[in-house]
Image (cartoon, coloured by chain):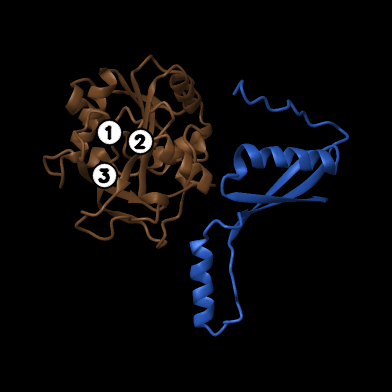
Amino acid sequence: MRVAVIVFPGSNCDRDMMVAIEQITGRRPALVWHKQDSFEAVDLAIVPGGFSFGDYLRCGALAARAPAMEAVQDHAARGGAVLGVCNGFQILLEAGMLPGVLVRNRDLRFVCRETCLQVEQNSASVFTSHLPEGTKLHIPVAHNEGNYFAEPDMLAELEANGQVALRYTEGSHHGPANPNGAAHDIAGIVSANGRVMGMMPHPERAMGAGHHSADGRLFLSAALEALAA
Amino acid sequence: MAEHPVDDKKTQKTDKNMQIVINISLKEGVLDPEGRAIQHALAALGFDEVAGVRTGKRITLDIEAEDVERARQRAAKMCESLLANTVIEDYEIEVADS
């Protein structure tokens, strides 16, 4: 399993993600600087969390137009898998690789806490396809703009196509199930072909051994296994 | 950026300096939690005649263009390709000759 992690000025989960992937696969992902307009063929390109370009203009707006993202788009167009986490999710939306937009949290506060996620059954997502039915994941979020918004028609289309992969659900020890006001409690969505996924929660921050949960490891391991299959 | 060709616009002697002001606001129907918080704060100060608050941002560009129409077209292109997220935002363009 070959993985690349894209790095922008202001990314701050790139190293955590690299370590998490290496722990699972035994192989260190390539770090790709945002100015690179191509990278060696990989199975999975990850757009990590952080505050790319200082969140200027809109979260992810400037990163979405970086040369490395053109390479990510080419990779996706060839059927390559892409995972965007937190700011990475915002970047995928700004790049038009996934529909909708992430706006300010409902309560106008940065939310940094554990959430409980329902893995949607029968979703188009390749990433979650190996997780057993009924799986709930405890994975933390840390964001100010995680409130998923799309027009009602688009939300209906996402639901009908099984493009909602992860939903906030009851079970968090730290507050209401939905931490940010996201429409339909959406925490993560996929492209129609299931191979481009964006999610607000940080699986690389729930790897066991010192973390409060190992469910991020479970999610990433199952995703990598499914992508390799 | 091969897929998004940007006109190779070189500054000509005939070009004029202009200022473009772009106002970006959330579309009608998109919740503006910041606007709502401001409305509540105004009400708490006694300004209870305020029935609604919408926030937005203003971007000012100093550009050179041959005429106002051309400047407006270029600004619209900038809004569509970067400055506004048209899923949730509207934009208005004002051009002033200087």
Which is nearer the N-term, disc 1 or disc 3? 1
Q: Nearer the viewer, residue A151 or B6?
A: A151
Chain identity of mark 2? A
Q: Quadrant of the N terminus of chain A?
A: top left
The residue at which mark 2 appears reads as: A48
For chain B, what colour was chosen?
A: blue
Confirm whether circles 3 and 2 share one chain.
yes
Q: Secondary structure at mark 2?
A: loop
The residue at which mark 3 appears reads as: A118
Q: Is residue A141 visible?
A: yes
Which is nearer the N-term, disc 1 or disc 2? 1
Nearer to us of marks 3 and 2 is 3
Residue type at mark 2? Answer: Pro
Residue B59 appears left or right of B15: left
Residue A172: quarter of image: bottom left
Residue A95 appears left or right of A143: right
Residue B8 appears left or right of A16: right
Residue A31: quarter of image: top left
Q: Residues within 10 Å of mark 1 (few under 14, many from 20)?
A: many
Residue A17, disc: 1
Q: Is residue A146 visible?
A: no
Residue type at mark 3? Answer: Gln
Residue type at mark 1? Answer: Met
Confirm whether circles 1 and 2 share one chain.
yes
Furthest-right residue in view?
A: B14
Q: Quadrant of the C terminus of chain A?
A: top left
Q: For the point 42% across and 61% down, which residue is it?
A: A108
In percent of width and height, residue B13 lies at: 86, 33
Q: Are marks 1 and 2 in contact (CB under 8 Å)?
A: yes
For chain A, what colour was chosen?
A: brown
